[in-house]
Amino acid sequence: MTALKLVLAAAALSLCAAADTRFDISYPASANSGPITGRVYVMISRTSQMEPRLQVGRVGVPFFGRDIKNLAPGQKAVIDETDLGSPVENLKDIPAGEYFVQGFISVYSEFHRADGHTVYMHDDKWEGQRWNRSPGNLFSKVEKIKVDAEKGYKISLVCDQVIPPVEIPADTEFVKSFKIQSPLLTKFWGRPIYMGATVLLPKDYARATLSYPVLYLQGHFSLNPPLGFAPTGNGKVLYDEWMKDDFPRMIVVTFQHPTPYFDDSYAVNSPNVGPYGDAILQELIPEVEKRFRVIRQPWARLLSGGSTGGWEALALQLYHPDFFGGAWSYCPDSVDFSDVEGINVYEDKNAFYKEIGWRHEPTINSREINGQVRQTSEQRNHFELVNGTRGRSGEQIDIWSAVFGPVGEDGYFEPLFDKMTGTMHPKVAQYWKDHSDLRYYMEKNWFTLGPQIVDRLHIYVGDADNFFLNNGVHRMQEWMAKTENPHYEGYFVYGAMKGHCYSGPENSADRLKQMAEYIMAKMPASTVADWWKN
């Protein structure tokens, strides 16, 4: 054999070895009767302080994923060098060494939606749309394994462990919760869809007959008491004030409304996620008002929330100014789509890079307070893509696309940009603007909206917000400063060198007192505020 043939043969053998770098993921019938349509993962960690599946995150451990369809018990799904990973994008780039490895299977359900589309999504099990913690999903035991991509390897992982049902916290004297099936959402999704609420009651509620103002506190899925209320730990400051005789009596409510796309619906109607806005106003809030003694007047219904909840508090106030009496919005998600975690939806040609003269510079998705880069847009979006294709990551940018964007031909949302290349889709960008840009909504509806929201908007954000959310807030403030008929500049507070999620110098108890004083100033002159003291 000639020297050239020997070199070619050696190269071919090397390629064969590299191509056999893979994980085989399977499950037994004892864990799930199958077949399973969903997604399989493998997680690789240097430590075992917690399971690798629980170490996945924006800046977490390397993990890789692949969609599966009708995988039967005992059948093997393969994850290899053709599958995208994050933050390491290819298995061959995992340095040789010993690691703690775990396999995982996320189970999807079939949804026959009312719009005629059939989609496969992860059906939330009241965990808040987190695949690595969702009841019924499968995982393998953690194994310590040596890997070396140059030599190649084939590792089998059996997902024989099943995540148990969520334990619902028991009601207490002050904290109650309930869960209901939504007829509106069930009809839209073609499967039972649930919403819930956790309610913090004032002191002496059980022994009084009064009705109380209510604060609807928006935010990510949680079964914990509103505002962290607790007699010990971080909730003790609020608890101690709450129990004082001169503290204003109010009811505070958090909602649970997870969707097949995310842990939260954004509390508005949208063609991909469904009529969550209608369901909250027509089903969930009426259920709160039926079960608890709430003053059923706009001046007694306030809104607040941070980040996702900050956007929701603003959106609910702007879209329903005759129902809610005021909003306190902290670090709201992009209220102007000229900056969506670094992406200018209206001007950028690519979501991953900025065109600066002859140069293409990476778009920064998130930063530290001192300005250092935490993650680029490309890294962030590839992380979401590893979590789930077709927007099924359960992550932030995918839910924005689902809520703000149109339905695609395949029944999943039509993306704002290509998640692999970053190429923007201008028609979808225009759809976002027309339907969900809050600053633009105010501008085009100001003649009728303006008089209804004067004195009702209170917006707080750190000027070093880790996700650049301060930029959209500044744009909203600049526009409001120029409003006429009426002229209303809003109330904006910026925290110098404060990150995500700045809510001002006040604690929760102080803010509730401010809100109570606000209600006192807005309620009809003939109303007696017997809820302030009892």
Image (tube, grey):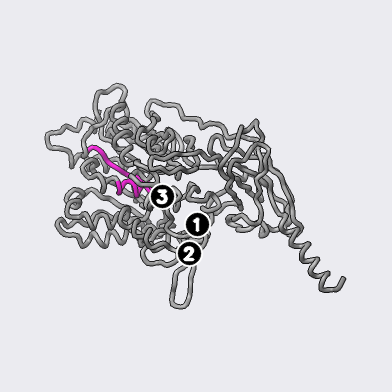
Q: Is residue 482 above or below residue 206?
A: below
Side of 440 relative to 99 (left or right)? left
Q: Residues at badges 3 and 1 in contact (C-beta under 8 Å)?
A: no
In this view, the residue in front, 466 or 389, is: 389
Residue 211 in which image quadrant: top left
What residue is pinned by disc 2?
352
Magenta-tinted stretch: 299-315
Q: Residues at badges 1 and 2 in contact (C-beta under 8 Å)?
A: yes
Q: Earlier in the sequence, mark 3 or mark 1?
A: 1
Residue 426 in which image quadrant: bottom left
Q: Which mark is residue 102?
A: none
Which residue is the extreme one toward the right?
Answer: 1
Percent coordinates x, y for residue 376 in the rendering: 50, 62
Q: Quadrant of the N terminus?
A: bottom right
Give the amino acid at mark 2.
Phe
What residue is pinned by disc 3?
402
Per the model, the C-alpha gap separating discs 2 and 3 is 20 Å
